Amino acid sequence: MQAIHQDNDSVLTECELPALKRLVESLETRHHIQVIKNPGICLTMVRAEDSLEKQEFFLGEALTTECEVSVDGRPGYGLCLGEEPIRSYCVAVCDALLHGESAAPAELLAFLEEHRALLIARDTEEFNHILRSHVDFKLMEQD
Amino acid sequence: MGYVAIKGGEDAIANANELVEFYRIKARTKPIELAQILGQFRLLIDKIMGEGSLYAPEHAALVLKQNEGDVFESAFMLRAYRATLQRRYYSEKLATREMFVRRRISSAFREIPGGQILGPTRDYSQRLLDARLVTETMGDIDAFLGEFEAKLDRSSLHGVPTLSKVIDLLQSEGLLREVEADTNRRVVDITREAVKFPAPRSAALQMLARAETGGIMSLAYSAQRGFGSAHATVGELRVGEVPVRVRDARGRVRLIGRIRVTEAEMISKIKTQKKDPVPYLSLGYGLCFGQNETKAISMGILDRTMRSGGDAPCQTQEFVLYHTEGIESYGFTNHLKLPHYVTFQSGLNNLRQAVERKEKNRGNLGFGSKPAPQKINQPAS
Amino acid sequence: MLRETVYNEIFDSQRHFRTILDSMSRPGKLNRFAPIPLTPPAGLAKPAAYVGLALLNADVSFHAELLGPEAVAYLRVNTHAQAAAPGLADFFFVRGSDGGAAALIAEAKLGLPAYPETGATFVFQVSRLGKSSNIGGLQLELTGPGIETREIIFVEGLNPDLITAIKTRNVEFPLGLDAMFVSEDESIMCLPRTTRVLVTNL
């Protein structure tokens, strides 16, 4: 079994954007947030390797949005695929709060658990749909 | 002889640009929304991202709309767009074993750990036109989705598994070998360093991953028809989402999202050695953005043929890699439409002079001067 | 703070890039940078920071050790470029008065015949640049591509050994090093590898 969406970044990069935005708007009222670097797009070169000889190679680039903030003086970096200025800002804010000196706000932790559960449910359902096309071909000689 | 450029024509060019826009929308149909292209032209988006070498679904949808669906032009535009952006990150190596699998099959083994999953495919369809789509409504879509959802037995859901690879079976038996032990393993980036031949395998894989689908398919097909030998079997083909991770400014590994990829592991025999006459199996590797199985399989075949030695097109690295590079071959073919007036006139001058010289020489050699022009179509008297 | 927040990565860098490009195409021409209130650390002059922020990115490397660790950190953090050893660096940031930079010039890469553009670029921080002799320092007489007849320029705060060091390495065109000089009043003057330089007041 795969432990999916255990990584907080996995939840933050895939959860519903309006919900994430509401969370961060609420966090903004309780924390001092300074944008160090406005969300901007750049590229990530995706590295890959062949599965037998482990030859590394470059697969191609993926559009990425990055943002840097400071929350109560703690740095936060937001990175996500695509042109996603709002999400990258939200990820940066959450990153700062999750990796600061003090404990992360309960509101943020609750959000992560709620949306982790939603994403796991979403992916599990999708996978079970896919599993309906699981096949066991028989050879002609077989019954 | 150098190329002589033209100038002028600004007004005509501007008007041509306007005309192409006119023909794009003159039917006055509802503007296609990007969400529709993203939602309903999934495979086309995937193809453009692969050939454009930029994973950016929304931007792929935009260029498709802008170019009236021209795949070459759209891939070209994505390449041009990526050239305007700074590359800030290099991902950790993709782990396709972590894939959220949507489709995974093997034509080598009937029973594989985790099983064969056909997933979304038209491979087993009868290629019949579906006339119902002519009048498809939102109601039809809702009805289908409702029924589809209802088919899931929510009381006994399986968790999302990690599927081991088919090649693990062969490897555990010791039947798989590297193609050559002494291959140049240097990792080059062909977007930063002009490719030189023989190119290291890393460069070849990178070029194939962004090659034009039809181009690599035709060369891979030539290999199977006998122009260079390749008897490849799909060891495993998987399509699905894999996480992308990068190191952020503080050096921490961060997950930034998932991309859809297709991976093909093509199994074929390697040449037997004098020292070791066992016909071991080896792997040709294909991996590309999006769901593009034709491309991944062709890439897997060509990865293998280019390392097999021989003079067939599919075995010649330079031939394969240069001619399957879609943007260059598309660009060159289309540049032929640009004015070559001076080039052509100078060729014509040379030809006229050559004809003149020939005539003169004939005179000098005493074979008589110009023959009298023959009368054509004179009615017999 | 180390991290620049006032710099617009698109518009400011493009504006400064045009200034640098013009200086490179017209060797000896003096251009003034549009001012931006950057706050580089003590060792790194503001116009050198302009050059750094305009030209460096994640694909290139630099060497700025002679200006101190803060200067290195500043350039790395704000441009994503990597600090590199002298034999590998694409850009060098040094003080023009620092004779020690000659060793870096001797070691810097000149490019390869197939890739001459990989030759290194030096950014020299000097005190003053000017067209009139009331500026002290070296009088340089320049000829070569981009100069109609000859150009005279005065550079204050530049160790003549560094000019000699560059000339010794720029003998095998198209291989070579390109040089930029930035002054305290935020001007820039460039000597690409194609320019022939004579120091005429020594």
Image: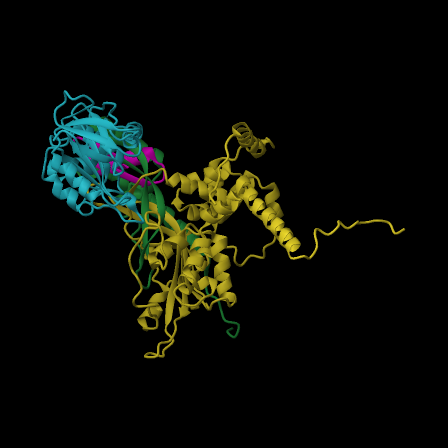
Chain colours: A green, B yellow, C cyan
Please state the total of marks drawn on the protein image: 0
Residue A105 or B350: which is nearer the viewer? B350
Q: Is residue B369 visible?
A: yes
Q: The magenta stretch spans which residues?
A: A68-95
Query: With respect to residue B163, does B290 lie above or below?
Result: above
Q: Hey, which quadrant is residue C29 in on the image?
A: top left
Residue at image position (29%, 45%) is: C116
Query: With respect to residue B197, does A17 lie above or below?
Result: above
The image shows residue B49 at horizontal and vertical percentages of 42, 46
Residue at image position (15%, 39%) is: C164
The image shows residue C201 at horizontal and vertical percentages of 13, 29
Residue A131 or B346: which is nearer the viewer? B346
Residue B329 or A131: which is nearer the viewer? B329
Please tell me whether residue A74 belongs to the stretch shown in magenta. Answer: yes
The image shows residue A92 at horizontal and vertical percentages of 25, 36
Residue at image position (28%, 32%) is: C24
Residue at image position (46%, 69%) is: B229
The image shows residue C83 at horizontal and vertical percentages of 18, 43
In screen coordinates, is C199 left or right of B282? left
Please tell me whether residue A38 belongs to the stretch shown in magenta. Answer: no
Q: Is residue B158 visible?
A: no
Q: Hey, which quadrant is residue B346 in on the image?
A: top right
Residue B257 or A138: which is nearer the viewer? B257
In screen coordinates, is C9 left or right of C96? right
